[in-house]
Image: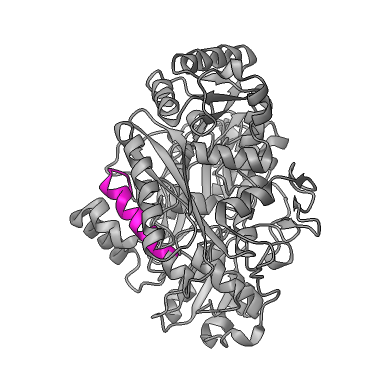
C-alpha cells in the first residue's frame, strides 16, 4: 500500500510542475485530494442496496423473488404469481398438458418443499472470537444468525436447492460480514490474515458451479463476505464514457441507475436481476447482448481487488497496455480464490435510440445453425440472436404461445415444407440508430431467407427474449411434482456445433435410460451467442424421478456423462458459468498441466495462508 501512495505522490509532483502559477502563488502546493480529473464526473449515487436479510424478499430454497413462482391452481391451470414480470398474473392453459405429457407427471403426485428453515438443523457457528471482536471494534456489520448463514451457504446448482427443499443443511458459513466500501474490505482481509480465518466472497448468490459451498474439510472459521452494501456508482465520466462502480451492485440496479443518467453498459446476463458486478468479473460473465457490447472482459477498463498481499490494480485507465501479461486476466475468472473485487471501471454507452425485436422460423435446426454461422461470418449479428431447437420450440409453443402454432397451421401455405416436428426458431434483438437498425434488420433477414428462414414477427421475438428471466422459476415447479432439471453450457467451433448438440442430447437420453429413469427425459439445446470462430451452446434437460432412490445422484451421473461428451466433441469446459468445485476435475485437461501450475503459483503467492479458501478452480 505504501508503494502505491508513493507512486501517486510522485505523479502528483510531475503534474504539479505543469500548472501555471502566478508570481504570488510561487510557494503554493497541490494536495492529493485537490487533483481533479479534467473530464466531468458525477457525484456518487445514493441508491438503496440489497437488504442484508435478502431472505425477506427472496426464496431461501429456490430461485428468485418470494412472491414470484409458477403453480398449478385448483382448476389445474398453470399461472405465474406476483407482479414483477410481464408473465405475472397470467394463466398458462397449455402448460399442464405439456408437463404431464412430456414427463409422465401427475398433479396428484406432489413433492412439496420444506416450507421454512428448521433452525435446529443448522450447526452452531464456529466463531473465531478475537476476529469477531476486532470486526466489531472496526464498526463492521456482522451476523451469525442461522438464516443469514444458510442463505449464503449455497448457489443454485440442482443438488444445493434439492437439499434445501428437503430441509438438509450441510456446512454453512459461521458468520456473515457486510463491508460498505473498499476500505472496509481491506480491514476485513487484514484481520482475516491476522486471525487465520477463511473468507468466501458473496455477491448475488446465483452461482451454478458449487462455488459458494463451504468446503467440508475446512476446520477454520468460515466467514461469508457479502458485498451487497457496496452498491454505489462512484462516478460517471461522460468524456471518456466510463463509470466507476462498487462491485457489490446488482445488475438490474446498475442498469437502472445508468439509464436514469442516459447511459447503459448493455451487459445483460440471464441472471442480471440478482447477480452482481463483482460476480461477473469473478466468473468471466457473458450477456445476451454481447454482440454489440462485448463480454465482461471487453467492458472492463479497471479493476480493484483486495488480496492478502495487498491491493491489485493498474496505474491508469488507459484503454490498452503492453506491460506483460494483463493482470486483469488473473482477476477475471478467479472465482473468489485470490481476493475480493471491490471496484470496477466499466465502459458505458448512451442508451440506444431505437430497439427492435424479431424472430425467424427455419425448416430445421441445421439450417438455423447455418444461418447463424453466415451472420457471424459477415459480422452483422444483431445485439442478440438465439436459436432454439425443435424441442424448445415445442415447449415455448405449448407453454407460452411463443410462436403461434395455430397461425402456422392455418397459414401453412406460407410455411410450405415446414414440419412442426422439425422446425426451429431464432429470436432477435436489434439496437442502435433507427436507420442503421432497419438496415441491419434487412441484412439479417435477407441472410435468413437464403437458409429457408421466414420472419415470424416482432412480438414473438420479444416474448422469447423476456422469457429468459422467468424460465429459471420453472425448475422449482418441476420439483414440486417429482421432476428435476438443469441447464449447462459450453462453447464450440462452428464445425462442431451440430455434432455436439446431437451427441450430447442422445447421450443424456441414453444415460437416463440406463440409470432407471422411467420416462424419456426432456433433452434440448439452443445456440445463445455467436463468435467469428464458434458459438455458445446451452443444454436443458429434465426427467421424472419417481421410483429413483437417489435422484440427485442419478442426475449428477447424467450431467457428468454429458460434460464428458461435450469435451470429447470439441466443446469447452464452460463458456460463462465458470468452474467452481463442480467442474474443476477437468481443469487440467482444459488448460494443461503447465497452465494449471501457473494458476496455482499465482494463488500461492497472492494468498499463501489460503485465506480465500473456497477451493474453487484448483
- Which image quarter is the N terminus in? bottom left
Q: Nearer the viewer, residue 614 or 521?
A: 521
Asked whether 536 or 216 is in front, the reply is 536
Taking 147 as reference, is 7 above or below it? above
Q: Is residue 437 above or below residue 369?
A: above
Q: What residue is rendered at 64% in x and 61% in y?
A: 106
- Asked whether the viewer can see residue 36, the reply is no
Position of residue 453 in the picture relative to residue 237 (left or right): left
Image coordinates of residue 322 in percent, x first then y, are 30, 36
Q: How is the image coloured?
A: one colour
Q: Of all residues shown, which one is farthest toward the left? A: 594
On the image, the x and y values in percent for residue 354 come to 66, 21
Task: Give the x, y percent position of residue 49.
Answer: 69, 56
- The answer to whether residue 494 of the structure is visible from this angle is yes
Q: Is residue 261 magenta?
A: no
Q: Is residue 557 magenta?
A: yes
How many numbered discs sit on the rendered protein? 0
In the rendered image, the quadrant that contains the C terminus is bottom left
Q: Position of residue 36 (x, y in %)?
A: 58, 39
The boundaries of the magenta stretch are 555-572
Q: Main secondary structure of the magenta part?
A: helix
Amino acid at each position: 500500500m505504501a508503494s502505491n501512495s508513493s507512486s501517486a505522490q510522485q505523479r502528483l509532483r510531475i503534474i504539479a510542475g505543469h500548472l501555471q502559477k502566478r508570481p504570488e502563488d510561487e510557494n503554493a502546493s497541490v494536495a492529493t485530494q485537490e487533483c481533479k480529473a479534467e473530464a466531468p464526473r458525477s457525484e456518487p449515487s445514493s441508491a438503496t442496496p440489497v437488504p442484508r436479510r435478502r431472505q425477506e424478499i427472496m426464496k431461501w430454497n429456490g430461485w428468485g423473488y418470494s412472491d414470484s413462482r409458477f403453480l398449478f391452481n385448483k382448476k389445474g391451470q398453470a399461472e405465474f404469481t406476483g407482479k414483477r414480470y410481464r408473465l405475472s398474473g397470467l394463466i398458462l392453459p397449455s402448460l399442464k398438458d405439456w408437463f404431464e405429457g412430456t414427463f409422465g407427471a401427475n398433479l396428484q403426485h406432489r413433492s412439496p418443499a420444506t416450507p421454512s428453515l428448521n433452525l435446529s438443523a443448522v450447526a452452531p457457528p464456529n466463531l473465531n472470537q478475537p476476529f469477531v471482536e476486532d470486526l466489531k471494534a472496526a464498526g463492521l456489520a456482522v451476523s451469525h444468525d442461522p438464516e443469514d448463514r444458510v442463505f449464503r451457504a449455497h448457489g443454485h446448482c440442482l443438488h444445493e436447492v434439492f437439499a434445501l427443499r428437503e430441509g438438509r443443511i450441510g456446512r454453512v458459513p459461521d458468520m456473515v460480514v457486510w463491508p460498505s466500501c473498499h476500505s472496509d474490505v481491506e480491514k476485513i482481509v487484514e484481520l482475516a490474515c491476522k486471525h487465520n480465518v477463511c473468507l468466501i466472497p458473496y455477491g448475488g448468490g446465483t452461482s451454478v458451479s458449487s462455488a459458494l459451498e463451504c468446503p467440508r474439510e475446512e476446520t477454520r472459521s468460515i466467514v461469508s463476505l457479502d458485498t451487497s452494501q457496496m452498491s454505489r456508482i462512484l462516478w460517471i465520466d461522460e468524456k471518456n464514457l466510463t463509470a466507476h462502480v462498487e462491485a457489490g451492485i446488482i445488475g438490474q440496479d446498475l442498469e437502472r441507475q445508468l439509464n436514469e443518467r442516459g447511459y447503459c453498459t448493455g451487459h445483460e446476463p440471464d441472471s442480471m436481476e440478482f447477480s452482481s458486478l463483482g460476480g461477473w468479473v469473478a466468473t468471466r460473465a457473458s450477456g445476451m447482448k454481447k454482440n454489440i457490447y462485448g463480454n465482461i472482459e471487453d467492458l472492463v477498463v479497471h479493476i480493484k481487488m483486495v488480496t492478502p498481499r495487498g491491493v491489485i490494480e493498474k496505474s491508469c485507465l488507459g484503454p490498452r497496455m503492453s506491460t506483460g501479461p494483463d493482470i486483469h486476466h488473473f482477476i477475471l475468472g478467479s472465482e473468489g480464490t485470490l481476493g475480493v473485487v471491490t471496484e470496477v471501471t466499466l465502459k458505458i454507452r448512451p442508451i440506444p435510440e431505437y430497439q427492435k425485436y424479431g424472430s425467424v422460423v427455419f425448416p430445421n435446426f441445421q439450417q438455423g445453425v447455418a444461418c447463424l454461422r453466415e451472420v457471424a461470418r459477415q459480422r452483422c449479428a444483431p445485439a442478440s440472436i438465439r436459436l432454439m431447437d425443435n424441442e424448445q420450440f415445442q415447449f415455448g409453443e405449448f407453454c407460452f404461445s411463443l410462436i403461434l402454432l395455430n397461425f402456422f397451421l392455418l397459414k401453412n401455405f406460407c410455411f410450405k415444407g415446414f414440419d412442426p416436428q422439425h422446425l426451429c426458431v431464432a429470436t432477435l434483438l436489434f439496437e442502435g440508430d433507427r436507420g442503421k437498425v432497419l438496415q441491419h434488420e434487412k441484412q439479417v433477414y435477407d441472410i435468413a431467407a437464403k437458409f429457408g428462414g421466414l420472419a415470424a414477427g416482432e412480438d414473438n421475438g420479444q416474448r422469447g427474449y423476456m422469457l429468459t428471466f422467468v424460465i429459471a422459476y420453472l425448475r422449482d415447479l418441476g420439483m414440486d411434482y417429482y421432476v428435476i432439471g438443469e441447464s449447462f453450457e459450453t462453447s464450440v467451433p462452428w464445425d462442431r456445433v451440430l455434432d455436439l448438440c446431437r451427441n450430447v442430447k442422445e447421450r443424456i437420453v441414453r444415460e437416463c435410460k440406463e440409470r432407471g429413469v422411467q420416462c424419456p427425459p426432456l433433452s434440448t439445446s439452443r445456440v445463445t451467442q455467436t463468435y467469428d470462430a464458434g458459438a455458445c451452446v446451452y443444454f436443458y434437460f429434465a426427467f421424472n424421478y419417481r421410483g429413483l432412490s437417489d435422484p440427485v445422484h442419478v442426475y449428477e451421473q447424467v450431467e457428468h456423462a454429458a460434460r464428458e461428451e461435450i469435451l470429447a466433441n470439441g466443446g469447452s469446459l464452460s463458456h460463462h458459468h465458470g468452474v467452481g468445485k463442480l467442474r474443476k476435475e477437468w481443469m487440467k485437461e482444459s488448460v494443461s498441466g503447465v497452465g494449471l501450475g501457473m494458476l496455482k503459483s499465482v494463488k500461492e503467492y497472492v494468498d499463501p495462508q489460503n485465506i480465500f479458501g473456497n477451493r474453487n478452480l484448483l
